[in-house]
Structures are given as C-alpha cells and as structure tokens.
C-alpha cells in the first residue's frame, strides 16, 4: 500500500496517536514504541517518531531513561496543579475572546454545546466526551488572539484529559460541567470580558471542587 504524501501523513499520524492516548486506548504509562506503533498504524517509522515527539512537547508523553517514550501519567497531585494554572489561563482566554467573537463564532459554539447536551442523555463515552470538551475550549482559546496563551492551554487541557479518575465520567459531573459551559457561552454572548473571565475560571475551579469531593 502506498503511503499518503509526507506533508499529509505527519499530521494524520499525530492525530491518530493523540486520539489513542486521549481515549485511553493507550493508557497512562503505556510504552510508545515507534516500531510497534508504525506496525499498528500501517505507516513507516519516520512520521510515528515525529508524532511521538509532538506528544512529548504537548505533555501527553514523557521520555523515561533506558525505557523510551511512554504516555504521561497524571496523578491526583499533578491534576490539581494543572487545573489551578488552567483556571487562570482559561479565564484570560475567555476575556480576550469575548470582544473578538463574531456572530458566526457564537453560532458554532452554540452548536457545539447543543451537541454536548444531546449526548448527556447517552452513556458516558470517554473518547467522544473528551473530543467535544476539547473542541469547545479550543475554539474559545483560538479566538483569544494570543498564540502563546493558546499553546500553553492546549498542553494543560490535554494533560487534564489524561487523568484517569471518575471526574468526567459520572453523569452528575457531566451535567454540572455542561451547565458551566452554558454560563461561559452566555457570558461570551454578552461581550463582557469580566463576565467571561469569571465564568471560565469558575468552570475550572468547579472541576477542582468535584475532584476534592470524590
């Protein structure tokens, strides 16, 4: 089988590996063998090697001495650190985005939230729910107009979703998170940076509170 063009193959392999990690198919601590992954995905080693390096730069993987790359492990202590920093940066991103979002942007966010709310009636699907949550937050941060902020938030959000607790799986936690998403959207629609910042920070602080109450 002929591989796709190299410029297209690299991002595709990275996207596939990232999905395997965030969905839990490659569990925290799992080895990221270039040889094994290239065989699994049916591609050459070069794009897999590059994709693994990207995962490391994103904080989704780590290099272990004498053992190679492995999926990162986010424990209770680490998730609290990640969420504490993310609360501040999410608030900043929402405040910046509040004055930049167009009617079209708000329509896309509304559609995303509607999809999340529709799936609330379904059983928890970690891969699906992770992708939808990341898409919601990614859309906001990308509209903030700050590339440095967007890059750091991408790392923090991805690491948060590596956490293997019941934080996002419990139906009550999912419904609470979606109500908080709705408050963020309402604040963004108002166009008030202070309200948007407060709603976004409250959402992440809510995650910390739910973690402490488990």
Image: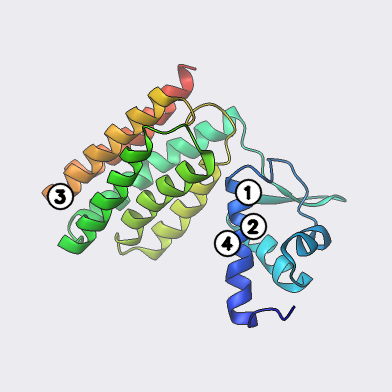
Q: Which residue is mark 1?
A: 21
Q: CA distance from mark 4 to mark 2?
A: 6 Å
Residue depicted at x 78% and y 70%: 45
Q: Is residue 133 left or right of residue 18?
A: left
Quadrant into which the N terminus falls: bottom right
Q: Is residue 110 left or right of residue 118?
A: left
**Contact? badges 2 and 1 (CB < 8 Å):** yes
Q: Nearer the viewer, mark 2 or mark 3?
A: 2
Residue depicted at x 88% and y 51%: 66
Q: Secondary structure at mark 1?
A: helix
Image location (x, y in percent) of residue 10: 63, 72
Precedes in sequence: disc 4 or disc 1: 4
Q: Which residue is mark 4?
A: 15
Q: Secondary structure at mark 2?
A: helix
Q: Which residue is mark 3?
A: 189
Q: CA distance from mark 2 to mark 3?
A: 35 Å
Q: CA distance from mark 2 to mark 1?
A: 6 Å
Precedes in sequence: disc 3 or disc 4: 4
The circle drawn on residue 11 is none
Q: Secondary structure at mark 4?
A: helix
Residue depicted at x 80% and y 63%: 39
| Quarter of image, res 210 | top left
**Contact? badges 4 and 2 (CB < 8 Å):** yes
Q: How many other residues sit within 10 Å of disc 4, few (<14), some (14-19) or many (≥20)?
A: some
Q: Which residue is mark 2?
A: 17
Is 45 rendered above or below residue 93?
below
Q: Between 135 and 150, which is closer to the camera in this rendering?
A: 135
**Contact? badges 3 and 4 (CB < 8 Å):** no
| Quarter of image, res 117 | top left
Precedes in sequence: disc 3 or disc 1: 1
Task: Name the colour scheme.
Answer: rainbow
Q: How many other residues sit within 10 Å of disc 2, few (<14), some (14-19) or many (≥20)?
A: many
């Amino acid at each position: 089988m002929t591989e796709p063009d190299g410029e297209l193959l690299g991002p595709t392999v990275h996207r596939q590996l990232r999905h395997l990690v965030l969905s839990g198919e490659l569990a925290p601590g799992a080895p990221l063998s270039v040889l094994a992954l290239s065989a699994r995905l049916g591609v050459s080693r070069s794009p897999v090697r590059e994709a693994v390096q990207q995962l490391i730069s994103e904080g989704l993987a780590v290099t272990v001495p004498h053992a190679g790359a492995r999926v990162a492990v986010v424990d209770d202590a680490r998730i609290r650190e990640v969420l504490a920093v993310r609360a501040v940066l999410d608030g900043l991103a929402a405040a910046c985005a509040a004055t930049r979002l167009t009617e079209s942007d708000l329509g896309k966010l509304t559609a995303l939230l509607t999809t999340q709310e529709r799936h609330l009636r379904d059983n928890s699907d970690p891969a699906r729910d992770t992708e939808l949550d990341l898409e919601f937050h990614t859309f906001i941060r990308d509209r903030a107009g700050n590339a440095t902020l967007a890059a750091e938030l991408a790392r923090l959000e991805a690491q948060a979703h590596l956490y293997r607790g019941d934080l996002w799986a419990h139906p009550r936690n999912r419904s609470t998170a979606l109500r908080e998403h709705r408050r963020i959207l309402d604040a963004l629609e108002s166009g008030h940076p202070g309200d948007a910042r407060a709603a976004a920070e409250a959402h992440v602080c809510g995650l910390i509170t739910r973690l402490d109450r488990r």
